[in-house]
Amino acid sequence: MTPETTGLDLLHAVEQTLVNEVGPLLAEAAPFSDVRFKILMAASAIRMVMREWRLRDELAALLARADGHGDLVAAIRAGEHDADAALHAALLADAELRTSISRPGAV
Amino acid sequence: MDEQARARLADWLGQALGARLAVTGAVRLSGGAIQENWQVAALVDGEPRAFVVRKDAAATIAASHSREHEFALISQAYEARVLVPEPVAFCADMGVLGSPFAVLAKVGGTGFGPRIVKDMALGGDRERLVAQLGAELARIHTIVPASNKGLDFLGEPPADPLHADIVGLRQSLDRLGAARAALEWGLRWAECQPSKRRDVTLVHRDFRTGNYMVDAEGLTAILDWEFAGWGDPMSDLGWFCATCWRFGRTDLEAGGIGSRAAFYAGYEQAGGWPVDPNAVAVWEVMAHIRWAVIALQQGERHASGREFSLEHALTGRMAAELELAVLRMTAPAAPPERSPV
């Protein structure tokens, strides 16, 4: 079978082009320009999309759980979960998952 | 700024200063859709001077108030001997530059947080710099509601600043329609902490690396006064030391540039309030929550379609790492180990 370029491969190629080809060009021409900053932001956003895609199943499960968080918010405010270690552990796991998409270095 | 605007500015500023004044140059510095900063060179009675003109790009009533209030705050801080750019004059006349504006003396230095943290050629000795920042904060905290002149727009001082902030952040989350259980957890944790009553003072509310300027020798100015209000002085210490404002140098607990001990000592020796480490710790958690709420608000500006901005979209995503930090700081205490019988 002919190897195919997946969507993820394409994103990776775009990200690499921005970082390795467009970025250095701008670094030379205008090191502190807004455009260079925006190119770096775009590359960062693409890396985030790639991580989100790889973790999509875990994220879908997290979002399904978070759907019911309206009631949970009210309960936390009412003090019904003070020092609730199980809830804290669950929230921590969710925050770690979200952060491993947005900024893995912070996990 | 065209020739006619320069001429109107020269006339108005000359009158304000009671001097012969000619504008010799005007360069736009920075800002975005909301605000414009201009560096203006002038000859004042023949002497060269440099000013910064801060104006709103568009004349909106809410925004013009903010410029006037910011000028009032900087003026009060200047009187309290805080290192701020000298406030020169405020112009409410829309006829001069199209919207109200403030004129401040130009101050040298750089303010970009990531650069200050990395570039050791800036700011002079770092322990001295954090002590100096502590001393500036102490002077800000000498401004109290009783001595308030012209700060009525700040409203009534809150009886319990921590509680007021918790209520305000919950309201912000409700307005966003954001069910963020991690932030709620952190707010409830803060609400349950024992607190000591302290006098309410002026607090800067955005006193952090990135909002002051330094040159090779040291500090040159404290900037960004638009969030200032009445509050708990310990909240400014917590905001400054919060991990999220250390720009990667988490080992340097005072703003990513120096030790907490030097910062606290500089604060107390300059007449600041006795530092309450427990209160500062609570305010550090609150700092992460407040920054997360601001990040969500920025993200919403993009997500709602009101304002297209990749930067806002990415800022919104920062809420996750801030929530993680909040949860790590607020773990329930482990159950006491059973003592051997």
Image: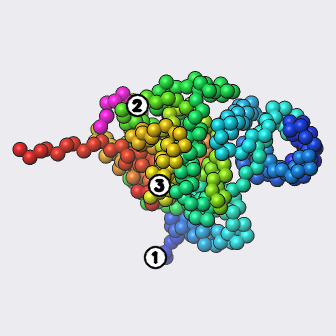
Q: CA distance from mark 2 to mark 3?
A: 25 Å
Q: Residues within 10 Å of mark 1 (few under 14, many from 20)?
A: few
Residue A98 appears left or right of B270: left
Can marks 1 and 2 be said to lie on one chain?
no
> Which residue is under mark 1?
A1
Q: Amino acid at mark 2?
A: Lys
Q: CA distance from mark 1 to mark 2?
A: 72 Å
Q: Residues within 10 Å of mark 2 (few under 14, many from 20)?
A: few
Locate residue A65: give its quadrant: top left
Q: Position of residue B103 (x, y in %)?
A: 79, 41
**Label 3: chain?**
B
Residue B259: numbered disc:
3
Which secondary structure lies at badge 1? loop
Residue A31, can we see it?
A: yes
Which secondary structure lies at badge 3? loop
Q: Amino acid at mark 3?
A: Ser
Residue A71: numbered disc:
none
Query: Does B40 appear above or below B98?
Result: below
The span picked out in magenta is: A77-83
For image coordinates 52% across by 48% down, the residue present is: B266
